[in-house]
Image (cartoon, rainbow, N blue to C red):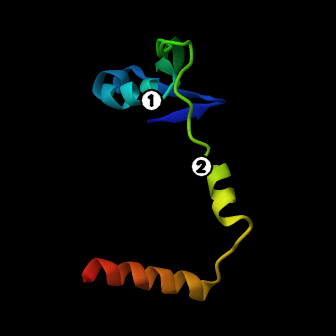
Amino acid sequence: MWTYIVHMKTVTVRDLRNNFSKLETWLGEGERIQIEKRGQPIAVLSAIPKKGGQLSKKPDFAARLKRLWGKRVFSHEEVAAMRAAELEGEEG
């Protein structure tokens, strides 16, 4: 249903009709969306730039992860202990 081509999301006409709220969210995040009908591209949908000419900047999750953890790799025992602590917090 949802696929990626290079840096543009691709949807079908059916997706446009039935799942517009999801597409609207993508547009709000600054995505460009290619619309296809029977496998052939027919249009590109993009958001109108916000005032100041800039679309909202997407967060860089990879950089944040690297900043928080560096090259840290958890052992099997550490992961098991963290999962147990999470489950314990949910129960009580």
Provide residue 19's location: percent of width, then percent of height.
32, 29
In the image, farthest residue toward the right: 71
Provide residue 32's location: percent of width, then percent of height.
53, 21
Q: Amino acid at mark 1?
A: Trp
Q: Residue at x 63, y 57 (%)?
A: 65
Where is 40 relative to 25, above or below? above
In the image, farthest residue toward the left: 92
Where is 66 relative to 13, above or below? below
Where is 81 relative to 48, above or below? below
Disc 1: which residue: 26
Q: Point out the image quarter for the C terminus.
A: bottom left
Instruction: Look at the numbered disc 1 and give the secondary structure of its residue.
Output: helix
Question: Is residue 60 rendered to the left or right of residue 2?
Answer: right
Question: Is residue 72 rendered to the left or right of residue 32?
Answer: right
Between residue 27 and residue 41, name the one nearer to us. Answer: 27
Q: Badge 1: how crowded within 10 Å, few (<14), some, or many (20+)?
A: some
Q: Badge 2: how crowded within 10 Å, few (<14), some, or many (20+)?
A: few
Q: Point out the image quarter for the N terminus.
A: top left
Spatial CA span between label 2 and label 1: 17 Å
Q: Nearer the viewer, mark 2 or mark 1?
A: 2
Disc 2: which residue: 61
Q: Is there a contact, CB below 8 Å, between mark 2 and mark 1?
A: no
Q: Amino acid at mark 2?
A: Phe
Q: Residue at x 68, y 57 (%)?
A: 67
Instruction: Look at the numbered disc 2 and give the secondary structure of its residue.
Output: helix
